Image (spheres, coloured by chain):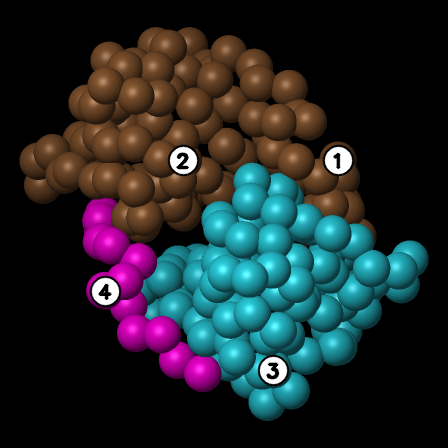
Chain colours: A brown, B cyan
Amino acid sequence: MKVFPNQSVEAKNADEGASKLKVRWLITKEMGAPNFAMRLFEMEPKGYSPLHSHPWEHEVYILEGEGSVVSEEGDKKFRTGDVVFVLPNEKHQFKNTGAKTLKFLCLVPI
Amino acid sequence: MKVFPNQSVEAKNADEGASKLKVRWLITKEMGAPNFAMRLFEMEPKGYSPLHSHPWEHEVYILEGEGSVVSEEGDKKFRTGDVVFVLPNEKHQFKNTGAKTLKFLCLVPI
């Protein structure tokens, strides 16, 4: 069993296509996770993730802040305490529309 | 894609062996999740989850409050912003040792 503060994991710049976005890989395959990984994203105001789709899902929980997610049904707003579930192959892009850092967990299959 | 507040999902009493513990199943197989489920637990002061083990992992993020988790290496404390990773077959029990409601996400494979 491992218990640790999220800040003990390095925040790295997120993938190409993102802006003002950092990611901490909190629970990974390398740590022994057999099925899925937990990441914590920190997005500055006006930051965004890439507009893309892929054959795996996202399970997202908004920890702090507010923003919107681009979807095939238009933009959807979210705020602290909201849940976002992106199905496999759904186009999506997260944006920070607020004045503070947006923090969210995003879990993906391994 | 689905975006919704966690409070829109009913809080149900947790399994036998738990005390003062409610669970909201936020993302489930029935919603179309192919690999893992997201649950939000709310534990009142002095509450606890069952002391048990099972052949699947827990990926936990502490949203609010403080507590401890019984492990095979002794009790480990945690607080807001901490991560707890329980490996498959590890014995574990979560306890609220604080004065406020303990809230945490706990994800499990489907």
For disc 1, the marked residue is A30
Tell me the subunit letter for badge 4: B
Is-magenta flag for residue B11? yes
Disc 1 to disc 3, how far (Cα)? 32 Å
State the residue at coordinates (49%, 49%): B63
Report helix, strand or loop for mark 2.
strand
For disc 4, the marked residue is B8
Do callouts 4 and 3 point to residues on the same chain? yes
Q: In the displayed image of the protein, which residue is found farthest to the bottom?
A: B16
What's the residue type where badge 4 is placed? Ser
Res B18 label: 3
The residue carrying pointer 3 sits among few (fewer than 14), some (14 to 19) or many (20 or more) residues within 10 Å by Cα, namely: some
Q: Say left or right for A65 vs B56.
A: left
Disc 1 to disc 4, how far (Cα)? 35 Å
Q: Which residues are magenta?
A: B1-13
**Quadrant in the picture for residue B25:** bottom left
For disc 2, the marked residue is A104
State the residue at coordinates (37%, 60%): B27
* Labels 3 and 2 touching (C-beta < 8 A): no
Measured as percent of width and height from the top left, residue A108 is found at 49, 42
Q: Say left or right for B92 vs A5.
A: right
What's the residue type where badge 1 is placed? Glu
State the residue at coordinates (45%, 75%): B22
Give the mark, 2 or 1, whose residue is nearer the N terminus.
Answer: 1
